[in-house]
Image (cartoon, rainbow, N blue to C red):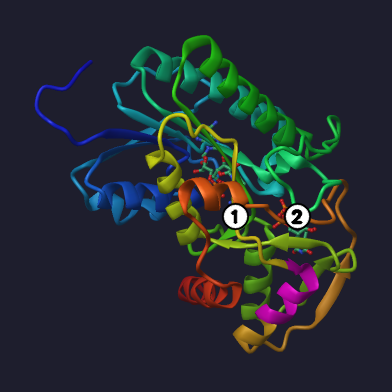
Amino acid sequence: MPRLYFSRKRVMVTGGAGFLGSHLVDRLLERGHEVLCVDNLFTGAKDNLAAAATNPRFEFLRHDVTWPLSVEVDEIWNLACPASPIHYQHDPVQTTKTSVLGAINMLTLATRLGAPIFQASTSEVYGDPHVHPQPESYWGNVNSIGPRSCYDEGKRCAETLFFDYQRQHDLPIKVARIFNTYGPRMHPADGRVVSNFIMQALRGEPITIYGDGSQTRSFCFVDDLIEGFLAFMDAPPEVTGPINLGNPSEFTILELAELTIRLTGSRSQIVRRPLPEDDPRQRQPDISFARETLGWEPRIALEQGLERTIAYFKALA
Ligand code: NAD
Ligand code: UDP
């Protein structure tokens, strides 16, 4: 339904009570938009929306995206999906349904409204990559039947759906492949490496390195990532992606453990635990495309971002 009075946008964010979603909600409110957050609170929390909730332009709707939804909005950001392995493996069938049915429901809504729609895809579409660093043109190396497949294949299928809706219905789409991101509002018990290491270091507990710690990841601070989201959505409609968004500075997990110990001044010892099945060996985004088309690149170094994240977790403890 067209609006009578306002030029300001009505924006919907699914998964808006989660780590990334809540930061996005805050930035969209700062831009003056009306924001509808749709979330089933599986891994998200209303606490993440404490600041947003004081804003009269903010609304919250508790809803599971695996079910159809009819609302009137001008723009959709589809972030709903658990992102940490322990969360998405808790109910793998629901994880696949969230990515696939969630995408179908949101794309159907976007088609009815003619609204641009953003998809939070993932570096996991590259699986355990044979090409390093990973450009968008790499098709990936994904196990379709392993314990990570519900997430990886669900996200791959969602990408397929986005591009088919674009071709079939001329829908304006934006597909971002997000690489490991960290920062305030990560769930302290979500099992991801940055939150695990910081919590362990702050509590003086052993730092659990899975495998020998030589596997690599590239960690992006959340504020940088959200700037990338906004630059991507602001880019002309022909810039559909998929586009890699992440920080290309690559670290081994052992280096991350040592840095966390140093920055927290912790006396924690490092211990080894078995490497989970299908754990990717290396991951580093090739962000040439984002640099060229959006003029975007991350600015916050790992040490600086970790300091801010440690301060957040300290305040929680
Ligand atoms: P998160 O778990 O903090 O947030 C996910 C949000 O989605 C939560 O609020 C959760 O309650 C909600 N949700 C889950 N299933 C839902 C459903 N069926 N219906 C409605 N809401 C549902 O995770 P995050 O780190 O903020 O990730 C957000 C998005 O970004 C996810 O789609 C994730 O796959 C993607 N992503 C994140 C990272 C990262 O490093 N954080 C990396 C790659 C991709
Ligand atoms: N990891 C680890 N100790 C932990 C948690 C994770 O060594 O306490 C490792 C994990 O095996 C992986 C890397 O850190 O190699 C990143 O794990 P995370 O779950 O954060 O993200 P993903 O594997 O999805 O990139």
**Range shown magenta:** 251-260
Q: Is residue 173 above or below residue 166?
A: below
Q: Within the magenta stretch, is there residue 103?
A: no
- At which x and y percent is residue 71? 32, 21
Q: Earlier in the sequence, mark 2 or mark 1?
A: 1
For the residues marked 2 and 1, what is the alpha-carbon distance in whole angstroms? 10 Å
Q: From the viewer's perspective, tell me whether residue 50 is left or right of residue 229.
A: left
Image marks 2 and 1: residues in contact by CB distance under 8 Å: no
The residue to which callout 1 is attached is 246
> Which disc number belongs to residue 206?
none
Q: Is residue 230 above or below residue 117?
A: below
Helix, strand or loop under label 2? loop
Q: Is mark 2 within 8 Å of ligand 2?
A: yes
Q: Is residue 234 above or below residue 238?
A: below
The residue to which callout 2 is attached is 283
Q: Is residue 317 visible?
A: yes
- At which x and y percent is residue 14? 45, 35
Question: Foreground: 120 or 87?
Answer: 120
Question: Foreground: 202 or 289?
Answer: 289
Helix, strand or loop under label 1? loop
Residue at figure coordinates x 52%, y 18% from the top left:
166
**Which quadrant of the structure image shows residue 59?**
top left
Q: Within the magenta stretch, is there residue 255?
A: yes
